[in-house]
Amino acid sequence: MFGQRISAKVFLGAVVAALFCLTATVAAAPIRIARLPIIVKGATHPDTATMDALESKIDRAVNVPLNGVLNIVEFLPEGECEEALAGVIADRRRQTGKKRIMYKEVMKELAQKMDADLVVCPVLTEYYERVYPVFSVNHGMVVVAYAGVQITGYDGRTDKVFNAKRSRSAHDDYGTQTQVKALALACMDDALAEAELRRYIPSAKEFIAAYDAGTE
């Protein structure tokens, strides 16, 4: 048993050392990702816990295991991304004379301004809930709720603008699954599944395979 633990430690050490050697020799620049924080468009803003849960879902969708070692992607500062987005929207308004600019219209310009390979712009388009008391034997409280999520962005390597939109609503007995925060979290899952952000981000396995192919 002791020998097995030592062997496992030696093997793990060898893997880590190999990864560090790989990163030291790889010349390719990391993929630059402009990942904006969630933009809330509805009149009602979710509480902090709900916003954190929504943000965590996006973080997991763009997470790259071993990125700290392999340096596959570089996440650009969120504040700079927000400032750049406001700038490209202002530019588009001046150019077109339109007051309302769709986020998907400026994703390519945002990528160019940030020198980003990938832009991910999540939007909470709807977030509403109202609870009514119902004085009857079968019902205590009824909820009317709806939520909407949009994941828009741009992939520079394919020159593609993507725009995934999902919404859910409830008009039912008040409960954990009919609350607006549950609807918003489900919408985020739906929109992320449609957007398939993983297809724009290489995994560690793909990164190493590309490196091996380039050194043959």
Image (tube, rainbow, N blue to C red):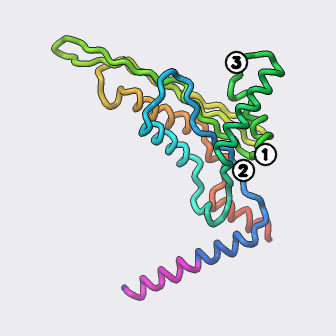
| Kind of residue at disc 3 | Arg
The residue carrying mark 2 is 32
The numbered dot on residue 115 is: 1
Instruction: For residue 157, say whether it is visible.
Output: no
Q: Amino acid at mark 1?
A: Asp
- Which segment did they paint magenta? 2-14
Asked if disc 2 and disc 1 are in contact, CB closer than 8 Å, the reply is yes
Is 3 contained in the magenta span? yes
Toward the left, the furthest residue is 137
Mark 2: amino acid: Arg
Image: 175 above or below 15: above
User: Going 81% across and 18% down the picture, which residue do you hit?
Assistant: 96
Task: Find residue 104 and report its horizontal and vertical position in percent.
Answer: 70, 29
Q: Residues within 10 Å of mark 2 (few under 14, many from 20)?
A: some
Give the mark nearest the N terminus, 1 or 3. Answer: 3
**Quarter of the figure with the C terminus:** bottom right
* Gap between marks 2 and 1 measured at Cα: 8 Å
* Distance from the alpha carbon under mark 3 to that under mark 2: 28 Å
Q: Quadrant of residue 175?
A: top left
Q: Position of residue 173 (x, y in %)?
A: 29, 21
Picture disc at residue 156: none
